[in-house]
Image: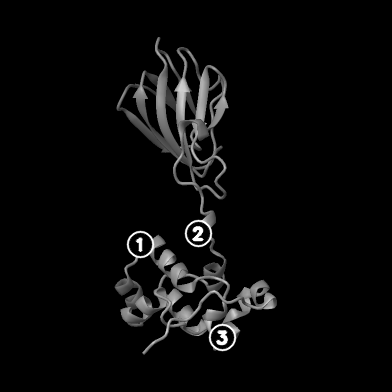
Amino acid sequence: MINKIDTRLKLPRYFVQFRPQVCRILNTPVSELAIDVGAQLRAVRTLYGLSQRELAKRAGVTNGLISLIEQNRVSPSVSSLKKVLDGIPMALSEFFTLDFSRTPQVFFRSDELTVMGDRSVTFRLVAGRRPNRAMSLLHEHYAPGADTGADMIRHEGEEGGVIVSGTIELTVGAETRQLGPGDAYYFTSAIPHRFRNPGSEPCEIISASTPPTF
């Protein structure tokens, strides 16, 4: 009969401070770590969209072992845990330090967006405080006659968007086009470009750019 093992025992301070050296202590039971190993593994597996069977196949272990670890019915050695994590792949140090209680915000109310610009041109940035963002997702508003300035804009990356309402005149390089609701654009941002609302109604655009420009 397999007894459930307490996986929340404290790890010695020096061990926590030097997690990259964990691999050298291959026989250390992970039951000594200051985390719920089973819950952590289940959360990581779910985060990567893997079933127990798929993770087991990748790691070269049985899916029964994955199940037992996640239920905290067995306490694997660090070397065994490393073998399982290699199937993701994920480093031991990342597994030990990943804090799911402090994961980045996923949902945002309208008043939580970061507002930039002025009354004529306004950009509302999604997840403005998210660290290491890979893109800028914007809700753009152009008042009638507003534009991004007389000078053309150019920067690294790519950008694209869909016009929600109103009309926008977009100049990309030597080409100019007027776009209306449902129309879209996508171009390399290094090409000089400019936005202008030539209409009598406000223009609304949902856009994205990468790498982030805001």
Pointer 2 residue: 100
Which disc, if any, is residue 2?
A: none
Pointer 1 residue: 49
| Tag 2: amino acid | Phe
Left/right placement of residue 179 relative to residue 92 reads: left
Q: Earlier in the sequence, mark 3 or mark 1?
A: 3
Q: Position of residue 156 (x, y in %)?
A: 53, 41
The answer to whether mark 2 and mark 1 are in CB contact below 8 A is no
The answer to whether mark 3 and mark 1 are in CB contact below 8 A is no
Estimate the spatial distance between the alpha carbons at disc 3 and disc 1, rounded to whole Å: 28 Å
For the residue pair 37 and 129, the one nearer the viewer reads as 37
Q: How many marks are shown on the rendered structure?
A: 3
Instruction: State the quadrant of the N terminus.
Output: bottom left
Above or below 132: residue 88: below
| Tag 3: amino acid | Thr
Pointer 3 residue: 28
Instruction: State the quadrant of the C terminus.
Output: top right
Q: Position of residue 28 (x, y in %)?
A: 56, 86
Q: Is residue 113 visible?
A: no
- For the residues carrying marks 3 and 1, which lies nearer the camera in this image? 3
Estimate the spatial distance between the alpha carbons at disc 2 and disc 1, rounded to whole Å: 15 Å
